[in-house]
Image (cartoon, helix red, strand yellow):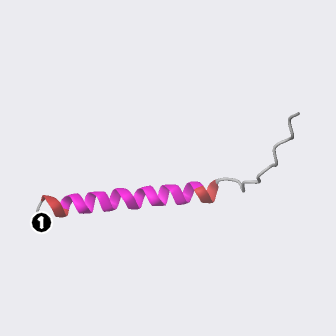
Amino acid sequence: MDDQDLLNIRTGVALMLDVKKRHRQRMNSPDYQWKKPALRR
């Protein structure tokens, strides 16, 4: 294996961990309920 292969493996693992973290965050966050802003006059 050369440096390019190792770089591809490293970036692939990093991206996978990032995706898993984002997914876990999304699953654990409460449901978002959009509230209409009050009219300012």
Coordinates of residue 29 in the picture (x, y in percent): 65, 53
State the image quarter where residue 14 is shown: bottom left
Residue closer to the observer: 2 or 39 = 39
Which quadrant is the N terminus positioned in?
A: bottom left
Question: What residue sits right under mark 1 in the picture?
Answer: 1
Which quadrant is the C terminus positioned in?
A: top right
* Secondary element at tag 1: loop
Q: Is residue 21 left or right of residue 4?
A: right
Q: Residue at x 55, y 58 (%)?
A: 24
Coordinates of residue 28 in the picture (x, y in percent): 63, 55
State the image quarter where residue 38 is shown: top right
Query: Vertically, is 39 above or below 32?
Result: above
The chief SS type of the magenta part is helix
Q: Residue at x 19, y 60 (%)?
A: 6
Q: Is residue 27 left or right of residue 4?
A: right
Query: Vertically, is 34 above or below 39?
Result: below
Residue closer to the observer: 41 or 37 = 41
Membership of 12 in magenta stretch: yes
Membership of 10 in magenta stretch: yes
Coordinates of residue 35 in the picture (x, y in percent): 80, 49
Residues drawn in magenta: 6-25
Amino acid bearing label 1: Met
State the image quarter where residue 10 is shown: bottom left
Q: Residue at x 82, y 48 (%)?
A: 36
Kindly give the residue lying farthest to the top in the view shown: 41
